[in-house]
Amino acid sequence: MTREFPFQLKAPDLLKTEAFVNGAWVPASSGKRFDVEDPGTGETFASCPDFDESDIDAVVRSSQEAFQHFRKENPRSRAEKLLAWDHLIRQNRDDLALVLTYEAGKPLAEAYAEIEYALGFTWWFAGEAERVRGNLSTPAAPNRRVLVVKQPIGVAAALVPWNFPIAMILRKVGAAFAAGCTMIAKPSPETPLTCLVLANLALQAGFAQGGGGFVQASPRQESVFYWVNPNWELDCEHCAEGLKKVTLELGGNCPFIIFDDCNQDQALEALLTLKWRHAGQACITANRVYIQEGIYEEFLTKLVERTKTIKLGHGADPETKMGPLTTPRAVIKAQAHIKDAVGGGARVAFGGRTGSDMGLSGGYYHEPTILCDVDQSMLISREETFAPVLGLLRFSTEDQVVEWANNTSMGLASYCFTKSVDRTWRMMENLEAGMIGMNTGNSSAAESPFGGMKQSGYGKESGKEVAVEEYLVSKTVTMTLEDHY
Ligand SMILES: O=CCCC(=O)O
């Protein structure tokens, strides 16, 4: 269906609204489509093909065919294509940012920041493509040499979240392409459009058949992607059954710990940037802020003063500092966490209102909200809020705060602010999290491993050590030589 977008692209042909299979733009075989909403107005502005099980075989088959060529491609050629893709994304970043703002709701400045972050992955993995290495050793048995050869694992599949739809696709696809795998990427139904722009640019960058498939499905159909095709089993249980390699990047409930010997301005700036980024919709955002009792009131006052200046509005309005939440269910969850905390004795130090309470018509807005006198029993301390709501807790000792910070099934990121070197080391070793920010908020970067422990996932994305390794298999080759040693 042709529809007028509420925005004007510099390159109107960039955004196709069909799925991308075998290098072509195709509808769902059922002809069904699902709607894409602008979270800033709640209005539908596009639609996408609603793939179901009858569409999947063709995607898997063509990605397997493409893989047979791609696995033999020279690493330098893969690196050049990743760089060409990087270049095209840079060239088209204004359009990409606009599409991102309309589908995810984030302010334009944040959309540009996400693209910049995401380009780190194309750049980084272009370099990594040529650095895939096996090894050679001399074993105890005489006259032998052992080679470990690394090869791409096959067609990979990525289920991509809606909060950073560009960065999260490039973090996965970049590593897969560097390894020589093709990939089927399925974006979240809330944000299917930026993925299609990336697919279009991948084709232009020279990836044959686009390097895999980029397919869409509504929430109703999404689950079929987890189990329908024996070659493409995705959830953890099915991956275990089929012995498929899997990497999971899941939720967080991240503690942000502020000791009284910290630089308060540094802690404040880091918290503001981390917490209000995409209205709190980041897995590594701070959910619970532990402030040592001596500086609690002073820090709270500063935090409220700065938060008051945040202007809420549509992401495309250049004045906007915080956009809407991407989904209406996020507003409901934010309100539930506030209600639970207030019911348990917490106080709203700032905010608390939804967009409709504030007279904003349409969209899924929520005021940035600071709750003080929160305790460990409240929902906001126990669950990921994924909204612009922050819980502040008072602590007295290091032992107490470490126990509270770790008292969760999650272990994605933890943050700690102190100027004591000894404490820095203790906190680094005692906090249970896959990523630790020391006097730093968001530390995500293409060159650093990203991933959690406990129920926040397993495996790592990005960085040097393991990211490409997740897409490789090892072969051990033992050779007997004559008249050797
Ligand atoms: O929400 C998860 C990803 C956020 C990030 O990569 O910084």
Image (cartoon, rainbow, N blue to C red):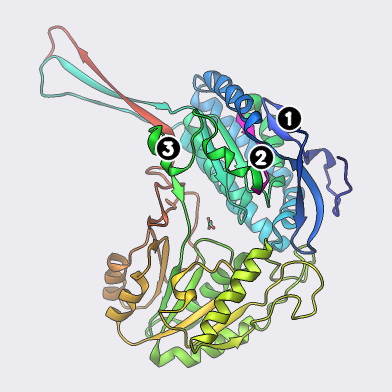
Quick check: 347 above or below 226? Answer: below
Mark 1 and mark 3: span between their CA atoms?
27 Å
Marked residue nearer the N-terminal end (2 or 3):
2
- Residue 468 location, x and y as percent? 44, 38
* Three-letter code, disc 3: Cys
- Residue 275 location, x and y as percent? 55, 71
Q: Is residue 132 visible?
A: no
Toward the top, the furthest residue is 482
Q: Which residue is mark 1?
A: 29
* Three-letter code, disc 1: Ser
* Quarter of the image that includes the C terminus: top left
Q: Which residue is mark 2?
A: 87
Q: Which residue is mark 3?
A: 239
**Dot 3 lies on which element?**
helix
Mark 2 and mark 1: span between their CA atoms?
34 Å
Marked residue nearer the N-terminal end (1 or 3):
1
Q: Residue at x 78, y 34 (%)?
A: 31
Q: Residue at x 56, y 66 (%)?
A: 386
Location of residue 418 (image quadrant): bottom left
Residue 34 part of the magenta-drawn span: no
At label 3, counting other C-alpha atoms closer than 10 Å, the crowd grade (few under 14, some 14-19, many 20 or more) is some
Magenta residues, as a range? 211-219
Q: Is residue 246 left or right of residue 64?
A: left
**Closer to viewer: mark 2 or mark 1:** 1
Location of residue 282 (image quadrant): bottom right
**Dot 1 lies on which element?**
loop
Ligand 1 within 8 Å of the CB at mark 2: no
- Residue 18 location, x and y as percent? 76, 36
* Three-letter code, disc 2: His
